[in-house]
Image: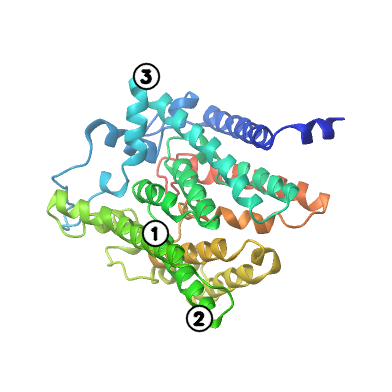
């Protein structure tokens, strides 16, 4: 009877139940961690939930909502930029600021906006999975989405939930070939979280793939679809490159955004310039030689294995069932991460936009596998919170 009642619910109600259960779990985990938290740079010992949910990047967003972005930059003794608001994009903090007009504090408004965006993202994620997967598999993928290792980001003062909602909607519209509807979401996403250039790459590769298929006579492409997809690609590219230009114009300092982002990795790499695709090579050497005390070639071999496994992942039959669009997104965003990010504790959060890959992870139907994966994901949540959200006297592992 319970199974029949569950199936009788509309899809959005079932997804909402999954979402609520996921948030209840993360609330318990965050409250437990807050109970064992000591005094730190942001809160006193044993902070309230709302205070604990507004640490780390949440404080940067709060500063942006309060005073905006600096026109005059601060430099350290070596002449390099210090950490500042330009590393954080404006849509999330200004939306939260608007919600504060209802009489809410920053802390309450930030969590409210995040939770509502996460709810929307979960609903859209299910619809996205249903375009490629059977209902039971799409629902199980949604369960994994709600208990993912970094799912606590769906209820703290970070922009990830908002970006996930926008990205899931963009991908859904892309799969449905509704390119004109994508355009405003593409612009909003570009000013919510970094990564828009990866979308431009994915769309550009898709256009090239469609033209190739049309040239071979496999699948013709209509001119309206070609024009709309090319315009979507250009909008994604221009939007993705806009924020660094805005930062430079506002401050009068060339490279404001890039140099500000690099200020967060200086303890790992020093003030080396950003050379695409070198950060992970640097990271492989750094982590394996300094932390694991192994030769550098072991780190390089591990990096090659990660890249190789990623390629294989995109080629397995469950991944092929996701369709070309989602696989191109996974490929493009993976290349983007390899090109610009130095691997460290924030990388787990940075990988969240790879969420369509959960459609592959959800493919096996054995009950032992599905229960086991949920247990693994919940355990990973606990590990991520203890590693990244916990604050120490000198914390080297920000989320």
What is the residue that sits farthest to the bottom in this orientation?
216
Q: Which residue in the protein does label 1 denote?
A: 232
Residue 153 at what x, y percent from top left? 50, 40
**Alpha-carbon distance for marks 3 and 1?**
35 Å
Disc 1 on helix, strand or loop? helix
Q: Residues within 10 Å of mark 1 (few under 14, many from 20)?
A: many
- Residue at x-position 44% and y-position 46%: 163
**Where's the N terminus, which quadrant?**
top right
Q: Is 223 positioned to the left or the right of 131 in the image?
A: left
Instruction: Point out the tag, 2 or 3, that comes first from the N-terminus.
Output: 3
Q: Which residue in the protein does label 3 denote?
A: 102
Residue 195 at what x, y percent from top left? 40, 56
Q: Which residue in the protein does label 2 denote?
A: 215
Residue 214 at what x, y percent from top left? 52, 76
What is the residue that sits farthest to the top in this orientation?
103
Residue 140 at what x, y percent from top left? 71, 47
Q: Residues within 10 Å of mark 2 (few under 14, many from 20)?
A: few
């Amino acid at each position: 009877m319970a199974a029949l009642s569950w199936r009788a619910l509309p899809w959005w109600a079932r997804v909402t139940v999954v979402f609520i259960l996921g948030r209840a779990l993360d609330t318990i985990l965050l409250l437990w961690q807050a109970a064992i938290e000591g005094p730190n740079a942001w809160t006193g010992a044993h902070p309230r939930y709302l205070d604990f949910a507004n640490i780390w990047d949440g404080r940067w967003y709060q500063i942006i909502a309060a005073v905006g972005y600096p026109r005059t930059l601060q430099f350290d003794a070596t002449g390099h930029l210090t950490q500042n608001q330009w590393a954080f994009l404006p849509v999330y903090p200004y939306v939260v600021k608007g919600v504060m007009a209802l009489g809410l504090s920053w802390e309450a408004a930030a969590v409210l906006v995040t939770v509502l965006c996460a709810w929307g993202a979960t609903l859209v994620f299910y619809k996205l999975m249903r375009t490629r997967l059977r209902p039971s598999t799409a629902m199980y993928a949604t369960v994994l989405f709600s208990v993912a290792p970094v799912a606590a980001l769906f209820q703290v003062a970070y922009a990830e939930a908002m970006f996930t909602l926008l990205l899931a909607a963009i991908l859904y519209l892309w799969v449905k070939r509704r390119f004109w509807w994508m355009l405003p979401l593409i612009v909003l996403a570009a000013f919510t979280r970094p990564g828009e250039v990866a979308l431009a790459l994915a769309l550009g590769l898709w256009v090239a793939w469609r033209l190739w298929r049309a040239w071979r006579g496999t699948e013709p492409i209509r001119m309206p679809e070609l024009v709309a997809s090319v315009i979507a690609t250009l909008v994604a590219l221009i939007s993705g490159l806009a924020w660094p230009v805005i930062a430079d114009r506002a401050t009068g300092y060339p490279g404001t955004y890039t140099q500000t982002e690099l200020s967060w990795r200086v303890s790992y790499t020093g003030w080396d310039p950003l050379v695409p695709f070198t950060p992970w090579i640097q990271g492989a050497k750094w982590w394996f030689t300094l932390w694991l005390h192994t030769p550098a070639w072991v780190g390089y071999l591990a990096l090659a294995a990660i890249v190789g496994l990623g390629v294989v992942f995109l080629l397995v039959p469950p991944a092929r069932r996701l369709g070309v669009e989602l696989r191109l997104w996974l490929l493009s965003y993976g290349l983007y991460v390899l090109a610009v990010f130095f691997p460290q504790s924030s990388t787990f959060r940075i990988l969240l936009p790879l969420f369509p890959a959960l459609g592959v992870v959800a493919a096996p139907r054995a009950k032992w596998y599905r229960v086991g994966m949920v247990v693994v994901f919940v355990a990973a949540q606990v590990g991520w919170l203890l590693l990244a959200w916990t604050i120490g006297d000198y914390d080297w592992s920000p989320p």
